[in-house]
Image: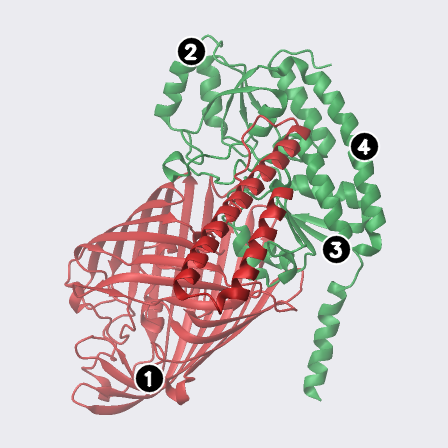
Chain colours: A green, B red
Amino acid sequence: MKKIRISILFLIVFLPLNAGAELRVFTCEPEWLALAEEIGQGRVKATSATHALQDPHYVEARPSLISRVRKADLVVCSGAQLEIGWLPMLLSKANNPGVLPGKDGFLEASSVVTRLGVPDTVDRAQGDMHPQGNPHIQMNPHNIALVARALGERMALLDPDNAAEYDRGTDEFLERWADAIAGWEKRAHSLAGKRVVCHHKSWLYLEDWLQLEEVATLEPVPGIPPTASHLSSLLNLLGADGSGADAIIRAPFQSAKASEWLESRAGIPAVVLPLTVGGSEAATDLFSLFEDILDRLLEVTGGTGS
Amino acid sequence: MKCRLTHMLVAGMFVFSSLAFAQDAPKGELDVLREEIRIMRAEYEARIADLEARLDAAEAAAAGSENREAASIQSPQTVSVARDSSFNPAIGVTFQGQAWSYDNDPEDYYIPGFPLGGEAGPAPEGLSLAETEITMSANVDDKFTAMLNVPIVIEDGEVAVELEEAWVETLSLPGGLAIRMGRFFADIGYLNDKHFHSWDFADQPLAYQVFLGNSYIDDGLQFRWLAPTDFYLEFSAEVLRGDRYPAGGAANSGIGSKTLSLKTGGDVGFSHSWQFGLSWLGADAEQRESGSEDDPLLFTGQTDLFIADFVWKWAPNGNSRQENFKFQAEYLWRNEDGAYTLPGDRENPWDYDQSGWYALAVYQPFPRWRFGARIDHLSGDTPDNSWIDTPLYPIGDDPVRYSVMVDWSNSEFSRFRFQYNHDKASIETDKQFGLQYVFSIGAHGAHSF
């Protein structure tokens, strides 16, 4: 009798949390949360493991994240080893068989796009390598479109009752997205061929999209913080007259010291670009994210911007 | 495609006809036929592989051009003929070495009243190799995953291979359940299941050395259940063989110890997160050794150990890479009820409580550098006079130890550490200076919170 009472108590305590028809989406990065909400509208309950001011490569496998993965129907992450330091731990601790890699409930966004920067040889002497290519795929809006299609299909698969809604959500988003891309590519015309120095190789896909030329990185090798000797060799390379490059780019969570030092010595303007939704005040959704990136790049390189 | 079909048809007919006549064919002819089949098979397999690779390349190129990146580097295509190595487990090796200097002889190290268990004790004086860990892990199939951790250690100058972890775990149980079986670190306390290479100090807190022999590892079954709550709440229960300290002798027909634990935790804003745990270990011991290796104490009886652990971590905006701070504390309390066999075969009944705690803080003010401090404390009942002059009788004040450390990491995979222990736990105060390195190559599993 006592046992029954205890189990009833358990049911009362835990069942209501499981109830509700929403599709629960756990994303590793804010851009996929924004995308899931664009497609799912009110039908998804999405949370992101990281926010825009956090480096998604260095996050702790916190208890709160474990309990969120436990209850997720779908896990969406950039992949390509970006989350290698914490996502495997979350998945192994969350005891949720539906969202393990290979299952319908796990979507690796970078697996549906063409990855850039796949190294020919993999050696940690070259820094923190990503053998499967550069993971920051969200910086090319064409990639966002490819992920949107895959994500919409997954959502429809996992929540078949609302499949038609997800299809419609995907189509509507892609239509607006294609218009937006056309506008951005027109605006960004003058950026083609501009030379940039990046803190970390976070902008490979942006460079590919806008045809920017990356002349150097502030990190001597990926994942190793900028050193004084590397910075002074960069100064030699770039010169002090501002002609070495058009901009120094960093993400909001990367330390300002190195790029500000180089800005003052080499006369190249430094700019902070949002790497994801929420990375700047203006970047409140996927559309304004790219809008803001273009605004900032055009401003710093002296483009007209309209 | 047509080409592939024709090849298969021809090969199929050939195999069929050769099988049909095989009975009548003389032995030499049979061998010739076999060889011919082998050559043909190798040929058409190579052609199929070539065709598939070309098809893959064509598909990838088509997909690439759709999003204006046809000219860029493609993801590596999988080779269609599977090689044996493609299912190799993730392999990693951790290299660890150290140098220690002591005032007192570390060979004679002991804490009056609190005999050390298992592998606990100071590292050798001078230069030495700490354990070299080899780890392998992979999914077994769709329902199981497996992990192996084999440290190579040097004991008294001899190279020895230990088995620290060898377990399989379920992947697909419903309802937030998981079962682990094999040899593993018991799921008690905060530090018990942390690997040597992920400790914040070069040695374990004294309470862990005394009550758990550094870490309690044993063979058995572990059941874990993660509650579907909005906050983190995990229960675990284990039944274990009971062959290692603080259990011993695989008592109770080989189910000598049991554990229960509860963990909870959460975030406070973006910058703070915490975890709290309570756990119990009940171990039966039969002729369990502790204290001096040459002349060990033997305990037979029941050990109950309770642990409360708390960890709080802070990183501005959750960016632990730039700056972070961690506070960690654990309280361990044990009762041992049974009898010790003292040197000279004298058996003496024992039923006393002992406890210990430690608290540590580690601060990383900027990338690469971390600074830490730790306090250790032990206390316990004073046993009756029959224990005077035995290692179980405490002398003087409660044992305490103060430690500081600084470490420098070039990357996530390399670390150097300096540590100083002001150790007042032994009879005479010991000033201990240590240097340590930790390097890892290959696959490196994600660390837990």
Disc 3 to disc 2, C-alpha distance = 56 Å
SS type, badge 1: loop
Say left or right for B227 vs B352: right
Residue at screen point 33% across, 45% down: B415
Circle 2 SS class: loop
Q: Chain of mark 1?
A: B
Q: Is residue A125 visible?
A: yes
Task: State yes or no: discs 2 and 4 in contact (Cβ < 8 Å).
Answer: no
Q: Amino acid at mark 4?
A: Glu
Query: Quick check: do tags 3 and 2 share a chain?
Result: yes
Which dot, 2 or 4, sits closer to the camera? 4
Q: Chain of mark 3?
A: A
Q: Is residue A213 above or below residue B382?
A: above
Circle 3: residue type = Leu
Question: How far apart are the alpha carbons under marks 2 and 4?
Answer: 45 Å
Q: Which mark is residue A175?
A: 4
Q: Which mark is residue A158?
A: 3
**What's the amino acid at mark 1?**
Gly
Is residue B388 positioned above or below B178 on the image? below
Give the spatial CA distance, label 3 vs label 1: 51 Å
> What is the CA distance from the residue labelled 2 to the residue labelled 1?
73 Å
Location of residue A216 in the rendering, given as x and y in whole percent from the top left corner: 46, 22
